[in-house]
Image (cartoon, helix red, strand yellow):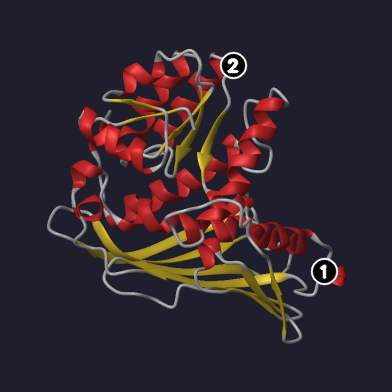
Amino acid sequence: MLACATRNSQSAADEFAKKYNIPIAYDSYEKLAKNADIDVVYIGSIHPTHVSIGELMVTNGKHVLIEKPIGMNEKEAERIYALAKKHKRFCMEALWSRFLPTYGHLIRECRLQEEDSSLGQALNIVGSFGFPIAEVDRISEKALGGGVTLDLGIYPFHVAFCVFGYKNIKDIVVRGHLNKEGCDTSVSVIVRYEPTSKGGVPRTANLTYSGHLELPNYVTISGTKGTITLTNPFWHTRKLLIPNDGQIEYKFPDTVECHYGNGPGFTYQVQEVKRCIDKGLLESERWSHEESLAIHRVLDEVRRQMVVVYPQDQQ
């Protein structure tokens, strides 16, 4: 890593740079954007600033990896993708789960013909994701993009996309709770998918996420031949439980020091960014702009039913 930047102060930037052995520290994003030696920027700021910082970097010639959610809504996500394409810069939403080997295994299994898959035809998903974080500022405050749908909900919806795809959603039913600021703090969702064939069996995802308590935090995918379980923590699990009482466990790289539990799993996402840039691609075919926009449409619909409105929705 060549440089880092913070919106707070030079001392905060210096402290971060010292901690992670980063050569250059800036007290503004504008200064980092002007550094011609920087090719690609990871943006991990609070949700409402993702697009504005992304636009700053892209217009200064940087490729960008922007933390999920890439925008506060589908319109914002569409705007940054369009700008990146205009400037011929690579742009991707940083949803690291998609690039983990466990998720690669799940996607391959779900793409097999029913007779060749140990799962058979996937028909039902049940998942939960929750931690007692409802009082944390980034969850509780509207100005910071608060709410559990944008912070947590994107992960179980992503599992549904991996299993059922993103083009055949029939309808979505949402129930949940809001705090006094109008941020969602717990949500339960039923997503119904069209059958894979005329007269076929309906497919359903039952997803719950909460900022009030720790939930089991695993996901089960049930099919006509058995069940696959993404074990806790499902969003960065190394282990899959597969039909016939088996399990598959992947070892993450051990050459990278991280301050976050399964942090070495981020390596796969970084490798994908490098692969795409080296090939001159503007987006990853493994996590395309189209699919990212589709998940934002789902998040928007959940918030619409919950009546969670951000200033960005009115622009």
Residue 250: x, y in percent? Answer: 68, 66
Residue 4 is tagged as none
In depth, the one of 201 and 164 nearer the eye is 164
Q: Residue furthest right?
A: 115
Whether residue 114 can be seen here? yes
Residue 114 is tagged as 1
Front position among marks 1 and 2: 2
Q: Which residue is mark 2?
A: 88
Q: Is 156 on the left or on the right of 116, as rendered?
A: left
Q: Is 145 on the left or on the right of 120, as rendered?
A: left
Instruction: Identify residue type, mark 1.
Output: Glu
Which mark is first along the chain, 2 or 1?
Answer: 2
Residue 95: x, y in percent? Answer: 52, 48
Q: CA distance from mark 1 to mark 2?
A: 40 Å
Image quarter where the C terminus lies is top left
Q: Quadrant of residue 108?
A: bottom right
Whether residue 312 can be seen here? no
Q: Is 87 on the left or on the right of 239, as rendered?
A: left
Residue 293: x, y in percent? Answer: 51, 39
Considering only vertical position in the picture, is 274 above or below 254? above
Residue 170: x, y in percent? Answer: 56, 57
In depth, the one of 83 and 138 nearer the eye is 138
